[in-house]
Amino acid sequence: MKKTLSLVLGLMMVLALAVPAMAAPLEIEYWSVFTGADGATMQGMVDAFNASQSDVKVNHAFEAGKFDGKAVDAVVKDTQKILN
């Protein structure tokens, strides 16, 4: 009985450590209004962040002119998900 319990507990520990390693990185959509040199600088910062770790992946998107509407839509949709 003790051998079985030890085996089960050992297997659970191995699985507990393996599952986070297999999980896909969290993806974040980052909207900005930066263009030209500022946009290139921002993209460089996003690229450097993505290269520095593997837990979070940031996707940078230029959204000038649509930013306010998209931000409000995202907040409303998330709020509706929480309330429903």
Image (cartoon, rainbow, N blue to C red):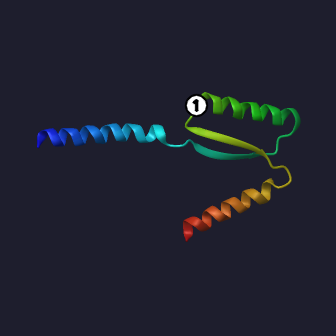
How far from the left and from the top, in percent, is residue 3? 14, 38
- Residue 84 higher or lower than 53, as above or below: below
Of the 4 image quadrants, the one containing the N terminus is: top left
Q: Which corner quadrant holds the C terminus?
A: bottom right
In the image, residue 38 lies at what x, y percent? Answer: 83, 34
Residue 18 shown left or right of residue 56 in the figure: left
Position of residue 65 measured from the top left corner of the image (x, y, whole percent):
86, 53
Instruction: Pick whichever, 8 or 70, lies toward us.
Output: 8
Kindly identify the amino acid type of the residue bearing the numbered disc 1.
Answer: Gln
Identify the residue at the far left of this view.
1
Crowdedness near tag 1: few (<14), some (14–19) or many (≥20) residues, C-alpha within 10 Å: few
- x and y percentages locating residue 83 in the rendered image: 56, 69
In this picture, is 68 found above or below 3?
below
Specify the farthest residue to the right: 36
- Please name the residue that numbered disc 1 is placed on: 53
Q: How many marks?
A: 1
Rendered residue at 62%/45% (across/down): 27
- Residue 51 shown left or right of residue 25 in the figure: right
Q: Secondary structure at mark 1?
A: loop
**17 or 76, which is in the foreground?**
17
Looking at the image, which residue is at 81% across and 49% down?
63
The part of the image, by quadrant, that contains residue 12 is: top left
Q: Nearer the viewer, residue 33 or 56?
A: 56
Residue at 73% over, 56% down: 71
Picture residue at 65% right of the left edge, 64% below the top: 77
